[in-house]
Amino acid sequence: IVAGSGSATVDPVTGLIAAVRSGTVTLIANSTGDVNYLSASTSQTIVISAGPQTLTITSANSLVVGGSLTASVSTTATSSSGGTISYTMTTLGSGSATVNPVTGFITAISAGTVNLIASTTGDTNYLSATTSQLITIGIGPQTLTITSANTLLVGGSLTASVSTTATSSSGGVLSFSILAGSGSATVDPDTGFVTAIGSGTVTLIASSTGDINYLPAIASQTITIGAGPQTLTITSANA
């Protein structure tokens, strides 16, 4: 083989040709001759066209809400990259996710199924190609954090505030309860309004029911209740 704008290899004995790069090459066949015939040579120009390639998505096909991964793709292209790979995401059913079109970084948004599509533009040696993968997104965990103050005075009150790592939905309905310790307090189970009754410590518990995208969760906070002020008023006659 004599390389031109393309390249190829040839087995000198069997004549098996393997195309390596698109373009043209020249195949030369030689005969040594024998007692009856002189040696001889001939040539043929071979045109090598861009060939097909197959993409395969090799990264995981499952995630949980709030989770992420970077898509990985293999290609049968050998003599070059086969072109630039880009990514898109389509929704199948109730799930949703985002994907970076350049890096393939995927973030799961809501539970269900989505379809990841990887495409390559092709190059001088390989044709464009596309492949897809069904990704199942499961219900994810959430973390609750009670962010309101952890101290009160007897007779004082506050409204509990809670943050959650749930992002695509509320994560479920919040409810509140109090576990008495050396102190005592009451809490409205719906609003989280806490009223301190007796000094000491109590435990405030916040719970979430979870929803279609997030599992139930619970958090607790120890509240220290100090002695509160009192006001005296003399109510007898002053004359």
Image (cartoon, rainbow, N blue to C red):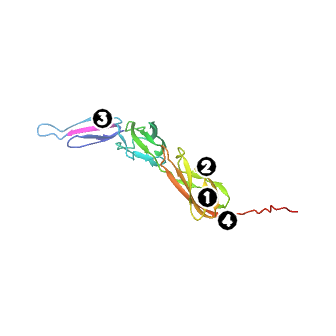
**Between disc 3 and disc 1, whose residue precedes?**
3
The residue identified by callout 4 is 227
**Residue kind at label 2, given as amino acid type:** Thr
**Is mark 3 in CB contact (under 8 Å) with mark 2?**
no
Which is in the foreground here, disc 4 or disc 3?
Answer: 4
**Residue kind at label 3, given as amino acid type:** Ile
Measured as percent of width and height from the top left, residue 3 is found at 33, 41
| Residue located at (45% from left, 46% from top) | 139
Which is in the foreground here, disc 1 or disc 2?
Answer: 1
**Between disc 3 and disc 2, whose residue precedes?**
3
The residue identified by callout 1 is 185
The residue identified by callout 3 is 46
**Is mark 4 in CB contact (under 8 Å) with mark 2?**
no
Q: Callout 1: few (<14), some (14-19), or many (20+) C-alpha neighbours within 10 Å?
A: many
Measured as percent of width and height from the top left, residue 13 is found at 20, 43
Q: Distance between the residues labelled 1 and 2?
A: 15 Å
Residue sticking out furthest to the left: 35
State which quadrant residue 38 falls in: top left
Measured as percent of width and height from the top left, residue 235 is found at 80, 61
**Between disc 4 and disc 3, whose residue precedes?**
3
Q: How far apart are marks 4 and 1 (CA)?
A: 13 Å
**Is mark 4 in CB contact (under 8 Å) with mark 1?**
no
Give the numbered dot on residue 191.
Answer: 2
Decide: is 233 above or below 130.
Answer: below
**Between disc 4 and disc 2, whose residue precedes?**
2
Task: In this rendered view, identify the residue nearer to me: 111 or 30.
Answer: 111
